[in-house]
Image: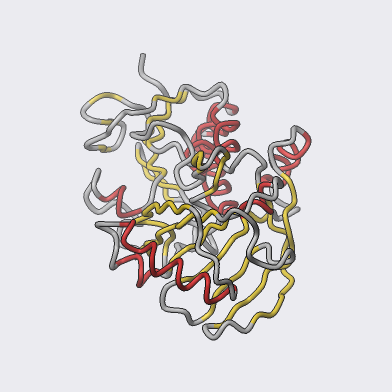
Amino acid sequence: MTVDVTVVGAGISGLACARAASAGGSTVQVVDRGRRVGGRLATRTLWGRPVDHGAAYFVVDEASDFSAVVSGWRERGLARPWTDTFAVIDADGALTHKRGPMRWAAPRGLRSLAEDLAEGLDVRLKTTVEKVEPYRVDGREAGDVVLAMPGPQAGRLLDAVPGAELEWEPVIAVALRWDARQWPGDLRGAFVDGHPDVSFIADDGDRRGDGAPVLVVHTTAQRARRHLDEPDGVIPDVVAATRALLGTDAEPDAAFAHRWTFARPAETRDAPFFRSPGLSVCGDAWGTRSAVRTAWESGHALGKALAAS
């Protein structure tokens, strides 16, 4: 049976699009080459607990439709407010605290939120797509086709797809575990300014709420580019930088590295999505700034537009 909409990509944008289109009466199928939904809402079980090694947190605009979704997650214990205060560490280790918007986290990992969005949808994982065109996926009728993925990946499926020309920055996320905390209790997360190797540090035990002595460190794009072929090669430099920035002599007991070749767009399109007959594009590169909520809002808006047509 031919569906009304085929979404290629089961990250938060693709799932939000599928849910909105389905709620509007369209028949929808989601396909993804991965083994699990979520995309960059990525959680991996390490050392007996979930660790977020993709997106670090998300922010909510109280006036948006996303706020109602987050409220539902909170009521069911899937999401919780984490912190409105991060540290800022300069390259020499000087630390200040800075307040900002409330950052939200997920006790079972951010992937659990994608799994909740996927509930009840026709999602087909471990399904590799080679080529798309309007109304067709790999030569088969597919209804309206939606590409919900980073632009460079979409460009591999279709020549000249809108958004494929945008530059994306890589990141290698390194999870580090100690036998006990080696950093101040009020250091929940930290932006690192001017460092050649490290851009962000998150206390995964604090955001998860279990107090585990685990940090997730994001590299700079320039450091990630040097290690895309061998992500584990970045671990010694990240460990040394993290210890210096936090002022600890203790070596971590374990480490894990994951490569994100297309972690975030360096620029975005000032439109919520792209739509043309039979082929549309959504994701966090479509909006005012790259963020989890941008990805959801882009997919949700596109799904509503497809259903309305």
Residue 225 visible in this rendered orientation of the protein = yes
User: Is residue 7 depicted above or below 42 in this figure?
Assistant: above
Residue at point 69%, 66% (across, down):
187
Residue at point 55%, 66% (across, down):
250
Left or right: residue 134 compared with residue 306: left
User: Is residue 195 depicted above or below 58 in this figure?
Assistant: below
User: Percent position (x, y) of residue 285?
Assistant: 45, 57
Left or right: residue 102 compared with residue 31: right
Quadrant location, the N terminus: top left
Residue at point 65%, 66% (across, down):
183
The figure's colour scheme reads: secondary structure
In front: 98, or 254?
254
Give the total number of marks visible in the rendering: 0
In front: 32, or 216?
216
* Residue at the farthest top position: 1
Residue at point 63%, 38% (across, down):
108
Left or right: residue 23 compared with residue 223: right
Residue 267 visible in this rendered orientation of the protein = no
In front: 306, or 82?
82
User: Percent position (x, y) of residue 276?
Assistant: 37, 44
* Residue at the farthest right position: 75
In front: 154, or 185?
185
User: Percent position (x, y) of residue 5?
Assistant: 42, 29
Q: Which of the 4 quarters of the picture holds residue 145?
A: top left
User: Percent position (x, y) of residue 257?
Assistant: 40, 54
